[in-house]
Amino acid sequence: MADNVVVSNMELERLLSMKGGKGEGSYANNSQAQAIHAKSMHHLLKEALDGVQLQEPNIPFVVVDLGCSCGSNTINVVDVIIKHIIKRYEALGSEPPEFSAFFSDLPGNDFNTLFQLLPPLANYGVSMEECLSASNHRAYFAAGVPGSFYRRLFPARFIDVFHSAFSLHWLSQVPESVMDKRSSAYNKGRVFIHGASEITANAYRKQFRSDLAGFLSSRSVELKRGGSMFLVCLGRTSVDPTDQGGAGLLFGTHFQDAWDDLVQEGLISSEKRDSFNIPVYAPSLQDVKEVVESDGSFAINKLEVFKGGSPLVVNQPGDAREVGKALANTCRSVSGVLVEAHIGDKLSEELFLRVERRAASHGKELLEQLQFFHIVASLSFAQ
């Protein structure tokens, strides 16, 4: 792709995705931390599932993972959901229904890699017990649904369980005022809002609230009465939106400095750097609570901050080079597609090499300080 491409907000929905394929910088090979964090929250997920109203066995049970990406994490969580629901039916002495699972993400998502990871469908002619005991098979019909979860994706009253993890912090667009040189919210010199001005951070906050409102409005039509939503996204513990917590350390330190390196070395202009912004906002509990309450469709069954831990998974914590590579690959797996579209493949490679070098020189403190906190929300229809 040409080096002078600027990704517009209109193009963002078409382009945004985690790094596809199965290479070193791919999401599939750099989402172990998300898997660990998700597993540590399974007890909260099962609590939410216990509140789902079970339908008659002749009515298919429908599960959706929104923002599924292209690794095995989405398959694992769908397995957890369906197995838990089957146990609930069995505890009632009832035959479980057939299950459908929809994997949904933006059109740029690497659905091919995801579908290759899907185990084959178990033979529905055998018993459900046999389906579950065949660990290399799945006990549900599967389909992909491309599109933005900030709009409608499914027919009305169609879904029993919505699940979304590590996705709702991605905005539908970079706020226009942040990209406008004439605006007081213009994010000059930065590629993320961590440490930016309060005006800039509030523009991101406003965009997050608008996006989440659209998300809730759409789900309120699609969810069945008696259904449930379990949502997890990056969050922050500070009330200050310019302090983006773990997301800030990921995108606002070594990643930011690497962009500055490219400018200082004359490889890109400062204007090129300034026209790139990571469309991520880590909300506070209050941000989420206010939007849910303003929408009014859903009751909050649980809303809390959950400490997930480090996004860096390394074999040798004392090996600074491995820590540096882990940080660079983590950044690349979630932002690489946007970076490549903005500055091209070659300069993208140069950028992430600089991220790796800078991170390697701060390996010990990175492992100690880079911690992710998540907002966990369990929602069902307000009575």
Image (cartoon, grey):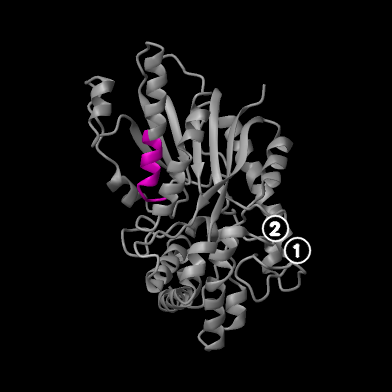
Residue shown at the point (54%, 43%) measured from the top left: 232
**Amino acid residing under circle 2:** Pro
The location of residue 142, given as percent across then percent down, is 35, 36
> 349 or 322, which lies in front?
322
* Furthest residue toward top: 93
Tell me the residue that label 2 is attached to: 241
| Quarter of the picture holding the N terminus | bottom left
Image location of residue 108, percent across then percent down? 43, 55
What secondary structure is marked by label 2? loop
**C-alpha separation, residue under disc 2 versus residue under disc 1:** 7 Å
- Residue 146: say if magenta: no
Which amino acid type is marked by label 1? Glu
Mark toward the start of the polypeptide (2 vs 1): 1
Q: Which residue, as the protein is rendered here, is positioned at the far front?
A: 318
Left or right: 209 as drawn, with respect to 154: right
Residue 74 among magenta residues: yes
Point out residue 236 in the picture as x, y percentages from the top left corner: 63, 53
- Residue underneath mark 1: 198
Magenta region, residue range: 69-79
- In the image, 355 versus 206, the foreground residue is 355
Q: Are marks 2 and 1 in contact (CB under 8 Å)?
A: yes
